[in-house]
Image (tube, coloured by chain):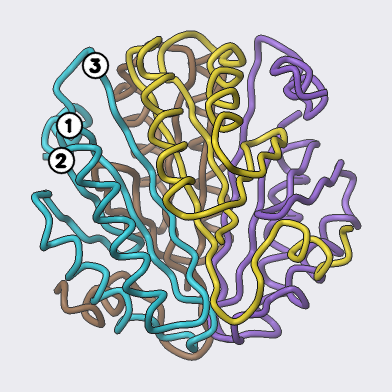
Chain colours: A yellow, B purple, C cyan, D brown
């Protein structure tokens, strides 16, 4: 189980990119993942392979509609403790 | 007004870093900023100078307690539209 | 063809992580990718699937030797122009 | 002394952003910093305050010419060892 963060940004389709971001979030929601969107990206929780598949499909979906895409994926994985959004937020007193 | 995302990670103090993250969030909350923490970082909203000051103090605060720190700051600033967490989330249908 | 940037950081194995970074770079070099390492990460050039495979293997290789790993992948892909490290650097006068 | 990585991306000025990236690199070079550009960003070495100033000026310079800018700054600072690009690259056998 990994906690990940994804951001997919089309470069060159004008400064308003919400249409593209919505599509990317729609892709994430098709997968067997917990999906939580904040103002700077989307946090995913699930299996590493599932996260990588969802990232690739979201990237390609946005590239389909635009000339250039800059996509970022951050993976947090640990073996010593259960790794979930909930446990992470509880540990810092934010839940 | 900018929307920013910050992550401050001590390297080398063991795999559990919540104690340090809590301190960093405490620093952000002293500033005149809107602060929203998610499982992979903290989103800030406010003036660019205020964000840069808060980022620097949080980085140095965590470095004070550890040997090495890796800090990341992402700034989203635009001139064509009001730029707030609320507007961004509303535009993608997540609010 | 994509240009990508990868960083693989073990959290909790002490402040010196070069042993782990070396192993990750060794993984990248097994793939059919152009690999250029700088002081803050490694730039990769090649097919998207190849980059994702290499990223996953490097992440898992470092996780094998440590308790927690934070890995970052940034993908730059465009359809309007050839996308290579060389063309990008030439366009900004750095080659 | 910190080693940092910066990337300044205008969103909405078309897919080709080299004109803006060049200007940002020009800003970095005015500061008392070691500057090394690669295909996905620029690595800086110097004092933390100098890095933050240069980052802010580069961000604002690009925003002056465009509607929206997404800027990223990553700071690596450590107290146990000298922290330079050269030492980091030497430690992983890339110099």
Q: Around disc 2, counting alpha carbons within 10 Å, would you say few (fewer than 14), some (14 to 19), or many (20 or more)?
A: some
For the point 51% across and 44% down, the residue is D72
Chain letter of the residue carrying label 1: C
Query: Hey, which quadrant is residue D43 in on the image?
Result: bottom left
Would residue C36 be found to the left or right of residue B72 on screen? left
Q: Earlier in the sequence, mark 1 or mark 3?
A: 1
Would residue A66 be found to the left or right of residue A36 on screen? left
Residue identified by numbered label 1: C1
x and y, in percent, of residue C31 in the image: 12, 55
Query: Hey, which quadrant is residue C49 in on the image?
Result: top left
For the point 11% across and 62% down, the residue is C30
Q: Are marks 2 and 1 in contact (CB under 8 Å)?
A: yes
Chain letter of the residue carrying label 3: C
x and y, in percent, of residue B34 in the image: 86, 41
Q: Around disc 3, counting alpha carbons within 10 Å, would you say few (fewer than 14), some (14 to 19), or many (20 or more)?
A: some
Residue identified by numbered label 2: C46
Q: Are marks 1 and 3 in contact (CB under 8 Å)?
A: no
Q: Do tags 2 and 1 sit on the same chain? A: yes
Front-lying residue, C26 or B31: C26
Residue identified by numbered label 3: C79
For the point 36% across and 75% down, the residue is C62
Against D46, is D82 above or below? Answer: below
Which corner quadrant holds the N terminus of chain A?
Answer: bottom right
Q: Secondary structure at mark 3?
A: loop
- Spatial CA span between label 3 and label 2: 14 Å
């Amino acid at each position: 189980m990994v906690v990940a963060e994804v951001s997919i940004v089309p470069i060159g389709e004008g400064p308003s990119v919400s249409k593209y971001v919505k599509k990317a979030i729609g892709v994430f929601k098709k997968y067997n993942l917990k999906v939580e969107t904040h103002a700077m990206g989307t946090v995913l929780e699930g299996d590493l392979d599932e996260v990588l598949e969802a990232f690739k499909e979201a990237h390609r979906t946005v590239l389909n509609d635009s000339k250039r895409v800059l996509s970022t994926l951050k993976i947090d994985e640990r073996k010593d403790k259960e790794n979930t959004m909930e446990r992470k937020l509880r540990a810092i007193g934010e839940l």
